[in-house]
Amino acid sequence: MSEKPETQHATRVLAAARKVPVLSMMFRRLEPRQQEIVSLLRRTTIFADLTASELIELLHLLHERTFVAGETVFTEGEPGLGLYVVLKGEIEIGSVDKDGKGRVARLGHGEVFGEVSFLDGSGRSATATATIKTDLIGFYRTELFDLLERKPALASKILLALARQMGMRMRAMLQLIQP
Amino acid sequence: MNPPVSVTFQGKRFSKWIRFGLPLLSLFLLWLLYHEAPLLFSSLVISFGLFYILNPVVDFLEAHSLSRIAASALVLAGLVAVMYLMWMRVLSFSTDIRAQMDLDVFQRNLVGTAQRVIVWVEVKMPVLKRFIEPETETLAAAVVEPARDVALKKRQKSRSGTEEPPPPPPPKPKTLPDRIEEFIAKQLMAVAPDLAKKLLGLLPNLILIPYFTFFLLKDGRSFRKTLIAWIPNRYFEPALKFFYELDRRMRSYFQSLMLDCVLVGVLVGVGSALVGAPYPVVFGLLACILNSIPLLGPLLYGLICLVITIGAGRPLDVVFGFAGVFVLSRICDDLVFQPTIYGKSHHIHPVVVVCAVLLGETVAGVWGMFLAIPITSILLLGLDIVREISMGEDTPPLPPSAFAPFA
């Protein structure tokens, strides 16, 4: 979503003000790690619609977690609290259907998982395990509830993007089922 | 690779006890801090209270492109300015008090008002006279008996014709006003040294509180994230949920407390001005500050304001008018403000609140009363977790899935 002309003008003024040594201390500055996370979030389907200031606001609510090779992120059936974005590494998603056949998916940099339990808090539908040393960005329901109180517009944007993604998946599944 | 199912199952159960253990651990640390480092304890409690009240303002400024450090400094500077203005008002009030009356005048006014109240009670409520009359009988006995003894000795002297040394004057009978005066003087003498020591003990707080508040506002979020980051991955989500609940309840309590105190302060200040009490602004400030202490605080500010009103020599109708304002403020606070402000956020029964406050007073005095409600809220959070464990509300783990790289 492109920014309004007024917002673009304000962004240019702020960028100029940041170059002044004394004034630059008054304004927010992002560390390189934070800039890397913000640019990653822009490429995800859930956070792609957020503006720069909204992403910076969201940054304070995200938690960076590191998993070693073979460590389980979450197990099938346990109650879930958050969705994750893969920052670095690889995650293996595994599940066993009623016929006893296993299904495996591998997720890499920039991919999102765990969003269904994030929305409804129910048990996880699969097991997620790190295959190599992996850095994940976690966004949790508790932070979403906090955001709903403080910034309902931003929280609504995230929830709408999640709902859109769920809708797209349902249509894809229906197309697979229908002859 | 098969997932370690038994460890997962035990980990899930163990995580519930971690959630239950965290509230108890928090309370234990709080109790330890209160006993071992009271100065640090008082500074931290007040700083956390100010943090929860001022954090929304800092968040608002930061959302409008101001850096966290600038927003925190600005908000804290505003708070210090407000505290300075309040302090100047209190200083000018104490200067007025010293200029207008001295302790003798103050005591005479108190005693005089007590006498007027007794006369008023005797006139308006004669049935209570029998409780007041024994004082006059005692007075009569104290005056008549020594006089009778003196008359008897004079007659004996005139008969014997010998010079006897004059009898000592009878002790002055203690009337009710005298006894009131003696009681007040004794109480003031008893409280003064302890009060002076406590006031001196509060001086380091004047530096520590702004210091802690500034860093909590600036780095509070980072502290929380750093603390949570230390928790192992397996227990991360339950711990996050506990910290979220704790944070939400504390924020709700302190913001509700501030709103309640401001409303009561405004009511008392406006009411005092309307009835003609002296220093209505100071009375309002006193009510605002002391209302934060459950049960004891309102009694304290009521008593102090009443004593100041009487000591300033105001007529009886002003004294009764202020008493009416105090009663009205208590009714509004207990029946309107608190149920509306606290009821939605905490869902604690009033009986539980009273028991908690009294228990808090026994354990930790005034601080115990002040922290009774938030600590009760933390304990109720722990009880919710116990309820979940006992009722088995968490879904049991599904049968182990033979996880392997399948074709």
Image (cartoon, rainbow, N blue to C red):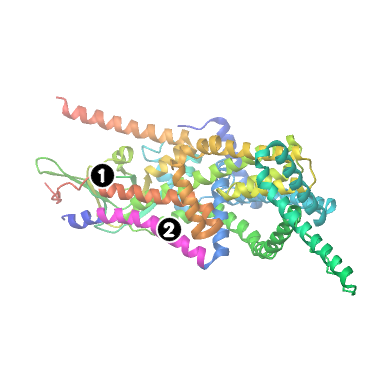
Q: Callout 2: few (<14), some (14-19), or many (20+) C-alpha neighbours within 10 Å?
A: few
Q: Position of residue B10 (x, y in %)?
A: 22, 56
As drawn, the residue found furthest toward the top would be A179
Q: Give the letter of the chain under mark 2.
A: B
Q: Is residue B42 above or below residue B351?
A: below
User: How far apart in space, not on screen, are marks 2 and 1 (Cα)?
Assistant: 25 Å
Q: Nearer the viewer, residue B190 or A159?
A: B190
In the displayed structure image, the side of residue B262 where residue A107 appears, left or right? left
* Residue displayed at 35% across by 49% down: B383
Q: Callout 1: few (<14), some (14-19), or many (20+) C-alpha neighbours within 10 Å?
A: few
Q: Which mark is residue B241?
A: none
Q: Which mark is residue B393?
A: 1
Q: Position of residue A77 (x, y in %)?
A: 22, 45
Q: Quadrant of residue A82?
A: top left
* Residue displayed at 52% across by 38% down: B341
* Residue displayed at 47% across by 42% down: B350
Q: Give the letter of the chain under mark 1.
A: B
| Magenta residue span | B12-35
Same chain for the residues under marks 2 and 1 in the image: yes
* Residue displayed at 20% across by 48% down: B397
The amino acid marked with disc number 1 is: Glu
Q: Position of residue B203 (x, y in %)?
A: 67, 62
**In magenta segment, residue B31:** yes
The answer to which of marks 2 and 1 sits earlier in the sequence is 2
Quadrant in which the N terminus of chain B appears: bottom left
Q: Secondary structure at mark 2?
A: helix
Q: Is residue A110 above or below residue B173?
A: above
Q: Which mark is residue B26?
A: 2
Q: Position of residue B277 (x, y in %)?
A: 75, 40
**In magenta segment, residue B28:** yes
